[in-house]
Image: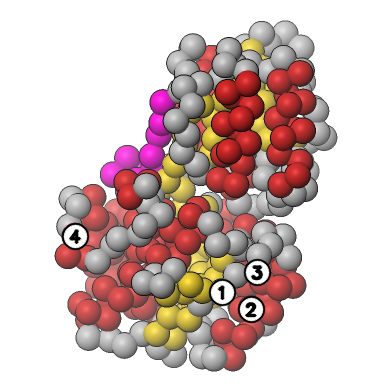
């Protein structure tokens, strides 16, 4: 399937999937360039954006042995500033803040330290020494929504988030709009629970780590008829995976990374994933900083492979050739800028 080829372009190799290294575990004493990362909450092994970003850091160090990488974990937002400052004090040559919630903290640290290059992941900055890394995940989520509408047996699907912030709601917008386009194009009437892109209101755990809350929300939606769930909540989203595993006929569309790679034991309930190529983008940012390139921005899209719909893995035979062909055609229309699809998220980088 051609979609899998696009997914490979932004493929995320989770080099940190095993036991996470100890904090402060830089191991290349000979390296002259220190690239340092601050995670968002959820930990470096969150099966989502922290882990993928750390994989990108490691990939850069593997490609260039003159680069040493390290990270500090944030338990909550109050850890952002002290962690960033700690890396400044330690003399890091490049500092990456992961997560849109940290962007303003990165901006402050960068403004106070204009000679140090920084990067913000899932955020946009106008500070000259900050490299912005963003992803138009509404595009990949639109494909995921269309897929969900094509595959549902109950006629009801659901999405929910960890927090009402643009890097989360952008997925939810695309997902709902993808379902809506399927309804329009195929004459179906699939309902979406959990998010209204018009009012920008929906259902959230207000926590990216509470797996119990994620499971409870998912079970509520399942009780209301949803058989495909799209959680946008990092580790909390594993609650949806657990709920799906306990309810026959229910599946999940994961986010950020290929769920079957990050959660291989649960692949039997993961229909697909709306991916963003965090590892590749972070790796490229580190290598660019090493070469003296400061600031600028990157936006991952379907066109450049920065976002993608993951392979169907164990659901490969369950998705019809007709649906696969339609997804390929829709993907190309999104790349071509076809506004008639109805894809329009106020959280998309192009809209901000």
Q: For the residues marked 4 and 3, what is the alpha-carbon distance in whole angstroms?
A: 32 Å
Residue drawn 59% across the image and 24% down it: 110
Q: Are marks 2 and 3 in contact (CB under 8 Å)?
A: yes
Mark 4 vs 1, N-terminal side? 1
**Classed neighbour count for the residue bearing mark 2: other residues with Cα under 10 Å, few (<14), some (14–19), many (≥20):** many
Q: For the residues marked 1 and 2, what is the alpha-carbon distance in whole angstroms?
A: 8 Å
Q: Which residue has dot 2 on it?
A: 217
Q: Residue 257 location in percent, x, y?
A: 53, 52
Q: Picture quarter containing residue 60?
A: top right
Q: For the residues marked 2 and 4, what is the alpha-carbon distance in whole angstroms?
A: 33 Å
Q: Is residue 9 visible?
A: no
**Classed neighbour count for the residue bearing mark 4: other residues with Cα under 10 Å, few (<14), some (14–19), many (≥20):** few
Q: Which mark is residue 143?
A: none
291 and 340: which one is in front?
340
Residue 191 against residue 296 in the figure, above or below = below
Mark 2 vs 4, N-terminal side? 2
Which circle, 1 or 2, is nearer the viewer? 1
Q: For the residues marked 2 and 3, what is the alpha-carbon distance in whole angstroms?
A: 8 Å
**Residue range corresponding to the magenta coloring:** 296-305
Q: Label 3's element? A: loop
Q: Which residue has dot 3 on it?
A: 205
Q: Which residue has dot 1 on it?
A: 203
Q: For the residues marked 4 and 1, what is the alpha-carbon distance in whole angstroms?
A: 27 Å
- Look at the image and say whether residue 213 sits in the magenta stretch: no
Q: Which residue has dot 4 on it?
A: 339
Q: Label 1's element? A: loop
Residue 254 against residue 104 in the figure, above or below = below
Q: Label 2's element? A: helix
Q: Residue 302 location in percent, x, y?
A: 32, 48
């Amino acid at each position: 399937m051609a979609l899998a080829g696009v997914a490979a372009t932004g493929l995320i190799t989770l080099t940190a999937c095993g036991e996470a290294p100890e904090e402060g575990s830089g191991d290349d004493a000979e390296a002259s360039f220190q690239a340092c990362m601050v995670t968002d909450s959820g930990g470096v092994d969150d099966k989502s954006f922290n882990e993928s970003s750390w994989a990108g850091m490691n990939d850069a160090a593997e490609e260039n042995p003159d680069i040493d990488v390290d990270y500090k974990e944030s338990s909550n937002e109050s850890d952002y500033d002290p962690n960033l400052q700690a890396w400044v004090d330690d003399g890091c040559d490049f500092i990456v803040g992961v997560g849109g919630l940290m962007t303003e903290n990165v901006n402050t640290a960068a403004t106070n330290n204009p000679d140090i290059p920084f990067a913000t992941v899932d955020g946009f900055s106008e500070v000259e020494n900050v490299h912005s890394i963003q992803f138009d995940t509404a595009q990949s989520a639109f494909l995921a929504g269309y897929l969900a509408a094509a595959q549902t047996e109950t006629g009801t699907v659901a999405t929910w988030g960890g927090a009402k912030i643009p890097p989360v709601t952008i997925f939810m917008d695309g997902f709902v709009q993808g379902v809506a386009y399927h309804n329009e194009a195929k004459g179906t009437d699939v309902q979406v629970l959990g998010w209204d892109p018009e009012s920008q209101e929906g259902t959230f755990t207000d926590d990216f780590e509470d797996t119990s809350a994620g499971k409870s929300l998912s079970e509520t939606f399942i009780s209301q008829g949803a058989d495909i769930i799209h959680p946008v909540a990092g580790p909390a989203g594993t609650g949806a995976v657990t709920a799906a595993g306990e309810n026959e006929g229910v599946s999940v569309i994961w986010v950020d990374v290929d769920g079957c790679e990050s959660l291989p034991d649960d692949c039997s309930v993961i229909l697909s994933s709306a991916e963003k190529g965090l590892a590749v983008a972070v790796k490229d940012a580190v290598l660019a900083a090493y070469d003296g390139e400061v600031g600028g921005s990157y936006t991952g899209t379907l066109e450049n492979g920065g976002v993608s719909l993951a392979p169907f893995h164990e659901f490969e035979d369950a998705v019809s050739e007709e649906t696969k062909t339609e997804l390929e055609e829709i993907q190309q229309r999104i790349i071509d800028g076809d506004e008639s699809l109805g894809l329009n998220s106020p959280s998309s980088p192009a809209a901000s």
